[in-house]
Amino acid sequence: MGNLLKKILRFSTFLKIGTIICLSGLLIAYLAPFVHPNTLRVIPFFGLAYPVILLFTLILLLIWSLARSKWAIYTLFVLLIGGKLHFRMISLGSNPEFIPESDKNLSVLSYNVRLFGLYTSDENERLANRNAMFNYIESINPDVACFQEFYHQDRPTSFATRDSLIQSLGIRDYHERYAHKLRGRQNFGVCILSKYPIIAKGDIMFDTQSENDFNYCIYVDVVKNKDTFRIYNVHLQSIKLKQEEYAVFTNDDGQTVEPPSTFRLLIDKLRVAYPKRAEQARKVAEHVQTSPYPVIVCGDFNDTPMSYSYNQFDKFLKDSFRQSAFGIGSTYVGKVPAGRIDYIFHSEELHSADFSIQEKAYSDHRAISCKIFKDSIH
């Protein structure tokens, strides 16, 4: 009997320690959207780990509740502190009762196409993957399409992308920004395609841009009927997790050493990327607030809803996923379990409906799309 009591007490002690760790981690995660990554660089990692921490916290709440322990009250209290932050990860929204006809709403798609699988080693697989993306985009048939990690090769080429999409979608105008490679006439960057007239276009230059970064933000003013929308296409700082970059790795003394593990490489990449993304997001958000028209912000943020970058836009815009979808959204299918990192935001005076996340992924991102319209349409 004594041994059993000791085991129960020991288990209870471990459970209390685990609860303290989880609750502390959850409290730090709550800070991630509001504290700049340069202030304390460990905080963004807690924001990234938030779903896991939350899951363990809910399990602990259940255990303590069944045990009728006061620790259940402590756990519930910390959960309640998070308030609306918990609802950033899920959507309980629904479509409005009335959705305007297609000629009175703007159908928008955002898609990180990962260069249409350009570097897939097998040519047949590469072409099949690109064609699958084309078919999906054509099935959505958006009025405006925002692409990140877009690839376009100047003619002559057997891997036409931009021109093929312009023809198949009936595109009237476009805006793009690329890093150019003269050899092979290759272009890597972002692109906006529009079925409706673009009356103005521009770029937002990132102060954190380096010659090895291909992350950009462009915008266009699109007119549909008598309504003008300013649409931003954003691709915030990438992690660029490639082990081959460390094929030859040297220490501070110039000695060749073993390359770091994938986990260590990920941590190092994130520590560099988080502050860059924060500054890029801040600069884009400041520009958005100067727009003379209602805005739509599309793109790959490379950050979760529990991040400083996301919060720069959530403060004054609506997340269309949370307005017109249901459930837990996940847009990234790459090596890092990041969940939802692709977004379509819009101004407060606009409404969104029919938010959709691509089911089958042909890139390391799933495409997202929705319909956006004004109050005045009702």
Image: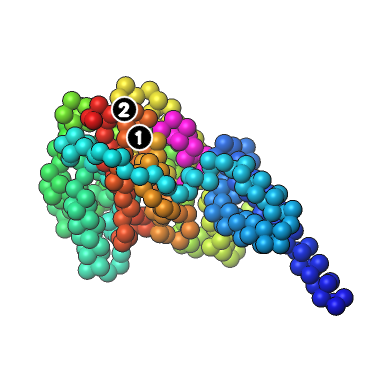
Q: Where does residue 72 sit, x and y in percent of width and height? A: 69, 54
The amino acid sitting under disc 2 is Pro
| Residue under numbered circle 2 | 294
Residue at position x 59%, y 49% in the image: 46
Q: Where does residue 165 sit, x and y in percent of width and height? A: 17, 49
Residue 279 visible in the displayed image: yes
* 325 lies left or right of 122: right
Nearest the camera: 325 or 311? 325
Residue at position x 42%, y 47% in the image: 91
- Residue extending farthest to the right is 2
Q: Which mark is residue 346?
A: 1
The amino acid sitting under disc 1 is His
Residue at position x 76%, y 67% in the image: 11
The magenta stretch spans residue 248: no
* 55 lies left or right of 244: right
Question: Helix, strand, or loop for circle 1?
Answer: strand
- Confirm or deny contact between disc 1 and disc 2 (CB under 8 A): yes
Residue 229 visible in the displayed image: no
Identify the image quadrant of residue 209.
Answer: top left
Give the crowd class for mark 2: few <14, some 14-19, many >=20 residues within 10 Å: some
Of mark 1 and mark 2, the one earlier in the sequence is 2
Q: Where does residue 23 sit, x and y in percent of width and height? A: 67, 51
Q: Where does residue 266 sit, x and y in percent of width and height? A: 53, 56
Give the crowd class for mark 1: few <14, some 14-19, many >=20 residues within 10 Å: many
- Report the Cα–Cα distance between label 1 and label 2: 8 Å
Q: Which residues are magenta?
A: 303-317
Q: Is residue 67 above or below residue 83?
A: below
Question: Which of the image's four quarters has the N terminus?
Answer: bottom right
* 18 lies left or right of 342: right
Question: Which of the image's four quarters has the C terminus?
Answer: top left
